[in-house]
Image (cartoon, rainbow, N blue to C red):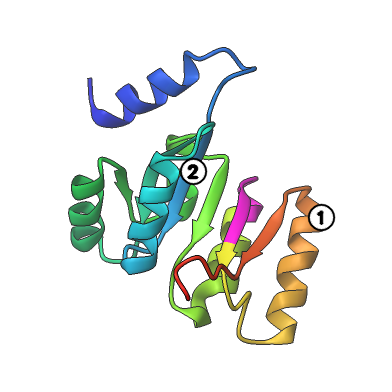
Amino acid sequence: MNRLTEVVGIVESAPQSIRPIRCAIVGHGNVAALYVRVLRDLPGAVAVAVCGRDLERTTHFADRNELLPFDNISAMIESARIDVVIVATPHPTHAEVAVAAMNQGAHVLVEKPMATSVADCDRMLSVASSVGVTLGVVSQRRFYA
């Protein structure tokens, strides 16, 4: 049994009323590592996968964090049955990544800034509305004194 089958099988076998929210992170930098830690401690959620452009680096991050590695957002959402995608990529890519995930039916949580232009923000909001998913933007200050 491969890791994808094992992780998806465990999550899918839970009754619907207690099935955890399956989360994936796009990006594999410091912010992504923080999300992995937070998701591990968050009841009702499970970090399942990570996606990045460089599959070798993504796989290294995935192995360190017991996640499934992907280099394609659509394949990740479909194969790992992702509910929520967390966008932790460089700012200029936020809109592209979020729109791709929402068009696959995933809810999206994007790190600030939402996007680098008002037009991209409008496009993201439009896609979320038309697809019927939730789009959230994070501006946390937990680690600031």
Q: Is mark 1 on a helix, strand or loop?
A: helix
Q: Residue 73 carries which label?
A: none
| Kind of residue at badge 2 | Cys
> Residue at horizontal 19%, vertical 49%?
64
Residue 135 within the segment the image draws in magenta:
no
| Residue at the extreme bottom of the image, as rendered | 117
Characterize the local packing of mark 1: few (<14), some (14-19) or many (20 or more) Cα atoms within 10 angstroms. few
> Depth-wise, is mark 2 or mark 1 nearer the camera?
2
| Residue 127 picture location, percent across and down | 75, 61
**Residue 104 magenta-drawn?**
yes
What span is colored magenta in the figure?
Answer: 102-109
Q: Is residue 68 visible?
A: yes
Given residues 111 and 102, the one toward you in this image is 111
**Is mark 2 in CB contact (under 8 Å) with mark 1?**
no
Disc number placed over residue 130 in the picture, else none: 1
Nearer to the camera, 99 or 39: 39
The location of residue 39, given as percent across then percent down, is 44, 44
